[in-house]
Amino acid sequence: MTTPNIFVLASDNSPQLLPLLRSNPSIASSQDSHGYSLLHAAASYNHHDLLRTLHHEFHVNPNIRDEDGETPLFVTETVETAQILVEELHCDISHTNNEGVTAEETIRGEGDFVVVAEYLKAVRMRASGRANGEVQEGEGVDEQRLPPLPPNVTVNMGTATEAEVPEEVDPVFRAKIEELAARENFRDEEGQRRLKELVTEAVRGVERGADGKDVRRRLD
């Protein structure tokens, strides 16, 4: 009797596949002569339940690579499949193939499934924001980690209409904060002292003029 081709079974999401894998779990991580895996097949053909089963039940590595160094994420054609790979199976979005190109760049370059590339870009940008210490929408702020405010300075939390919110942060103030945050001593006593000074300056709306006098900013 001819042994069924498991890669074809995976592509077709055949009901024969899982019983075959359960009878011999070691073949779940099999790859053909080009490094193509069952996980690549499931991702390419959007078989979501199979993706989850291969990883959760048979422990197939979501970052398994083919001969080009490409993971299943590289052959993804829908955002839903990409979400499962990235958010559930924790596929590495920063992985590069043998040419040094990420899945996001590969998919965008091919031009057929740009919406998937846009999703991967959004994930990358969120991850980059967290790495830089930015607070994402919906994430809480740990008050215990915030430095104390300068003396006589209080902050009232509330909501504001769009008209009350300035279109952009003062570029000079932003540059000062970014420059300070980039310093190695940002978290030590001197860095925190300078941060307090910047906060005080922003709250008071005062800049030091060239003649050494305090000049109040215009607020209109």
Image: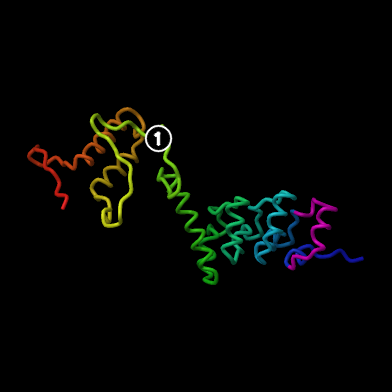
Q: Position of residue 169 (x, y in %)?
A: 27, 51
Q: Position of residue 59 (x, y in %)?
A: 72, 48
Residue at 33% x, 45% y is 158
Residue at 52% x, 61% y is 104
The answer to if 13 sits in the magenta stretch is yes
Residue nearest the viewer, comparing 162 with 50: 162
Instruction: List the residue tagged with mark 1.
Output: 143
Q: Element at badge 1?
A: helix
Q: Tell me the kind of residue under disc 1.
A: Glu
User: Splitting the image into 4 quarters, where does residue 190 fall?
Assistant: top left
- Which residue is farthest top? 189
User: Splitting the image into 4 quarters, where does residue 133 fall?
Assistant: top left
Residue nearest the viewer, comparing 163 with 119: 163
Residue at 83% x, 57% y is 19
The answer to if 132 sits in the magenta stretch is no
Residue nearest the viewer, comparing 137 with 88: 137
User: Splitting the image into 4 quarters, where does residue 184 fall?
Assistant: top left
Question: In the rendered image of this protein, does residue 195 appear above or below residue 63?
Answer: above
Magenta segment main secondary structure: helix
Q: Position of residue 131 (x, y in %)?
A: 45, 44
- Asked if residue 128 lies left or right of residue 17, the reply is left
Magenta-highlighted residues: 12-28
- Asked if residue 124 lies left or right of residue 165, the reply is right
Residue nearest the viewer, comparing 123 with 135: 135
- Which residue is farthest left? 211
